[in-house]
Image (tube, rainbow, N blue to C red):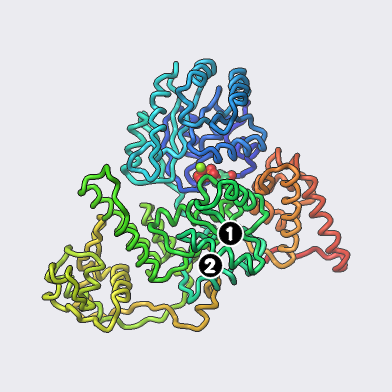
Amino acid sequence: MGMNKLEVLKKTFGYDSFRPGQEELIDGILAGRDVLGIMPTGAGKSLCYQVPALLLPGVSVVVSPLISLMKDQVQALNAAGVHAAFLNSSLTENQIQKAIALAARGRYKIIYVAPERLMTPRFQWLSHEIGISMLCVDEAHCISQWGQDFRPSYLAISDYIASLPERPCVCAFTATATAQVREDIVRALSLRDPLVKITGFDRKNLYWSVEKPKNKTDFCLSYVRKHEGESGIIYCSTRKNVDRLYGILRDERIPAGRYHAGMEQEERVRSQDDFIYDNISVMVATNAFGMGIDKSNVRYVIHYNMPASIENYYQEAGRAGRDGERAECILLYSPQDTLINRMMLENKSGNEQMTPEEARTVHDQDEIRLSRMEHYCVGFSCLRNEILSYFGEPVTEPCGNCGNCSREYTERDCTKEANAALSLISSIPGRYGQNLIAAALHGSKTKRIEETGLDTKPCYGALSSLSEAEIRDLLIQFTDLGILERSEDQYGLFFPGPRAQEVRDGEKVACRFELQAEESTERPSPRRKKASASSETTVLTPEGNELFAKLRSLRFLLARQRSIPPYLVFSDRTLTQMCIALPRTKEELLALPGVGEKNLASYGNRFLEEIGTYLSDYAKAHDGARPQTTG
Ligand code: ADP
Ligand code: MG
């Protein structure tokens, strides 16, 4: 074909530059190496194998577990002018027959296949008939028993590789990063000296915040109203909450849909399609919603309840802003959430196949995940850094673009409380985690406290004027301040920290507290000290927004005519860029991010016309002036 990777990126996918990690992984594959890419959801893993697939000779086979995902990807590739097909149980025998026949004649560059199909005689025949230059395993964590989503059918992949006349380059991608799962993938796929790349957990366009509104429903209502016309997801922990909130939004005439596992399959599919095709703007859902959905213009994800871990949270919230435009991830926290989550952990019935020790370990792991999640909700340090350090990426300065970096606090002297915590913990370093320590400082008289003898230790009951939850919050702040330290294992045991001695020597300790302002109920978007420079996205003026709305309607129309999701026409980001650059010619349009030759040819003229009309209407109404679309 004679194109290089940058040309493919631009011409086929319409992007100007690679995202972090993509280029290295692509280079690795092109150099014939096995690779393992660990990047969060939305980071752009598909491109890492699609670009080399188009550059390598022969065919690339992509193994993927999700039928809907395969369909979407193939649809998107076809829309970009790439010949691709999928083989899975959603096709009839006849369709499969046809696809295989076409594949054998070299019609496709990329074939998506469900793992169950790999060893079928027909696919085996096909694999020997055509030259397979790359085998890609998407959602590779499915091969590991340690992952959240083990699929035994994935174990057939290594048999498949072995069955091929020539071993292709093998690449694997996942968003799950634990060391255990990583090792499992390398072993189970017998990757040869793979290039391993972990990257991209920082999503600069996402604004993270934790809100503690008095009434979560009111918060959602006013937020959704303020963001009218934007796509957003509201995650609730239970079906009941979903149904209730959905009912309230509908009563308020907000175009909302709902999704949970208790609904009929047909209704779920309809609801999901309505959301993807922008017929509704708000989706209220349990975590059953979102797997494999690549809707790029989700502008906000609100969590009505705290999830059980940061992994879960990041996965769900990360569905916002896949197009790289600014989007908000808001978690609505109340202490109740912690209690409910804890209760669910206690009642979680262990798997019968587990030994008591294994069950115990799993339970402890769940506990520590939950307490890290709680830490995220009640802590005062930079939220972005909390997430990055959780996933093992190095952090430096506070980001300046999250709820905690822009929140206003009051500070209070907590020297006495710090000293009490220190003297208790110094008497029993590394013995207990936050719940017992908080209970002891509070002076609780539970059986567990008696058993451990904590009621005989210094400062037992010294903070009886505070609730255990308040003490837990303080322990978290003391940890952030380096006065205390916690073990990194699943137990999170407390030790005196590097700054303990200074505090014992009389240094004052100040802790931060939420402003107890009235507004905190009516505060849909946090009062910001002006979002800082690190947000790279652009803000449109009212004129810009007007044009944006027109372009969005046009996009909706064109997508509907072709029965494809609107974001496949142009992304939100591209529409925004059109509003800023106000292109008049095809060349100017092509220069914008997200515009490739294919979508330029299909839709370019319509958008240029729309922009032209807007400009001339504006000029007529304003003495020939040009609108100021960006601030
Ligand atoms: P993942 O599989 O990692 O969850 P995807 O491969 O589905 O993510 O990509 C998420 C989104 O990011 C898609 O809309 C994709 O088109 C977009 N994307 C990927 N790479 C780039 C890039 N280099 N520039 C701009 N957008 C990109
Ligand atoms: Mg993916």
Residue at disc 1, CB closer than 8 Å to ligand 1: no
Please name whichever residue, 280 or 403, is drawn nearer the observer in this view of the structure. 280
Mark sitting on residue 621: none
Please name whichever residue, 242 or 423, is drawn nearer the observer in this view of the structure. 242
- Image height check: is 499 above or below 90? below
Q: Residue at x 42, y 24 (%)?
A: 161
- The image shows residue 69 at horizontal and vertical percentages of 55, 40
> Few, some or many C-alpha atoms within 10 Å of disc 1 (few <14, some 14-19, many ≥20)?
many
Residue 18 seen in this snapshot: no
Secondary element under disc 2, as helix, strand or loop, is loop
Which residue matches tag 1?
A: 232
Q: Residue at x 44, y 61 (%)?
A: 384
Which quarter of the rendering shows the N terminus?
top right
For residue 88, which quarter of the picture?
Answer: top right
Which residue matches tag 2?
A: 532
Q: Residue at x 43, y 45 (%)?
A: 175
**Label 1 vs label 2, nearer the camera:** 1
Give the amino acid at mark 2.
Ser
- Image height check: is 176 above or below 30? below
- Image height check: is 550 above or below 165? below
- The image shows residue 81 at horizontal and vertical percentages of 67, 33
Residue 163 seen in this snapshot: yes
Which mark sits nearer the N-terminus, 1 or 2? 1
- The image shows residue 462 at horizontal and vertical percentages of 20, 81
Secondary element under disc 1, as helix, strand or loop, is strand
Task: Give the Cα separation between the discs numbered 1 and 2.
Answer: 24 Å
For residue 386, which quarter of the picture?
Answer: bottom left
